[in-house]
């Protein structure tokens, strides 16, 4: 089957999309948004767009399905989650569906390893930003007292 030839590529595409969403959820969902709003908005759009393209491409092009009904079910789930995310204002619901559907045929040990490496790197970055906050000019510092250190969705809370 042609799919098995691309199985390593599918795993890399999935892990890259997962890592992009992790960076998005930690660094650009922290207080960086308030301190650097223009840069943060561009990065969030870029990270989200790339992650959605990678994960959707993996689901559609690089996943082997045994039956036609599986493809129909996946299309229904993607349409439903996209619709409810659009009208409900919760993009993370759609992204969670992409992560779940994209995990088919991926070695989850490798995905977990990528997740943990990205998490540690993000933790180091957020902590470095937190400790650098007092060095920033007052006009940035007064808008935001620290960078994502105690953010409820941050690595501090996850750890």
Image (cartoon, rainbow, N blue to C red):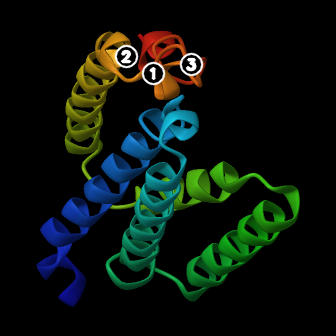
From the top left corner, tell me how far across and down residue 96 is, in percent. 58, 50
**Residue depth check, mark 3 versus mark 2: number of the one nearer the observer:** 3
Q: Secondary structure at mark 2?
A: helix
Name which residue lies at 65% across and 59% down: 94
Which numbered circle lies on residue 35?
A: none
Q: Secondary structure at mark 1?
A: loop
Q: Secondary structure at mark 3?
A: loop
Residue 56 in view: yes
Question: Which residue was labeled with disc 1?
Answer: 147
Is 95 or 128 nearer to us in this picture? 128
Side of 143 where 39 appears, left or right: left
From the top left corner, tell me how far across and down residue 43 is, in percent. 42, 56
Q: Earlier in the sequence, mark 3 or mark 1?
A: 3
Q: Is residue 154 above or below residue 82?
A: above
Residue 1 in view: no
Name which residue lies at 26% across and 29% down: 116
Name which residue lies at 46% across and 61% down: 42
Question: Which residue was labeled with disc 2?
Answer: 133
Side of 24 where 134 appears, left or right: left
From the top left corner, tell me how far across and down residue 41 is, in percent. 53, 56
Q: Are marks 2 and 1 in contact (CB under 8 Å)?
A: yes
Name which residue lies at 57% across and 24% down: 153
How far, Cα to Cα, is label 3 from label 1? 12 Å
Tell me the quadrant of the picture where the N terminus can be found: bottom left
Side of 153 where 125 appears, left or right: left
Res 120 quadrant in image: top left
Q: Earlier in the sequence, mark 3 or mark 2?
A: 2
Q: Earlier in the sequence, mark 2 or mark 1?
A: 2
Which numbered circle lies on residue 142?
A: 3
Disc 1 residue crowd, few under 14, some 14–19, many 20+, Cα 10 Å: many
């Amino acid at each position: 089957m042609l799919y098995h030839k691309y199985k390593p590529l599918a795993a890399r595409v999935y892990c890259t999309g997962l890592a992009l969403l992790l960076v998005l959820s930690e660094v650009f969902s922290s207080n960086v948004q308030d301190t650097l709003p223009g840069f943060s908005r561009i990065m969030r759009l870029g990270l989200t767009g790339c992650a959605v393209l990678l994960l959707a491409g993996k689901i559609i092009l690089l996943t082997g399905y045994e039956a036609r009904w599986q493809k129909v079910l996946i299309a229904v789930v993607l349409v439903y989650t996209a619709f409810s995310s659009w009208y409900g204002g919760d993009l993370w619901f759609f992204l969670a569906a992409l992560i779940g559907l994209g995990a088919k045929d991926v070695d989850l040990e490798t995905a977990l390893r990528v997740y943990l490496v990205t998490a540690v790197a993000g933790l180091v970055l957020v902590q470095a930003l937190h400790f650098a906050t007092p060095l920033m000019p007052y006009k940035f510092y007064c808008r935001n007292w620290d960078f994502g250190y105690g953010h409820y969705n941050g690595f501090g809370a996850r750890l």
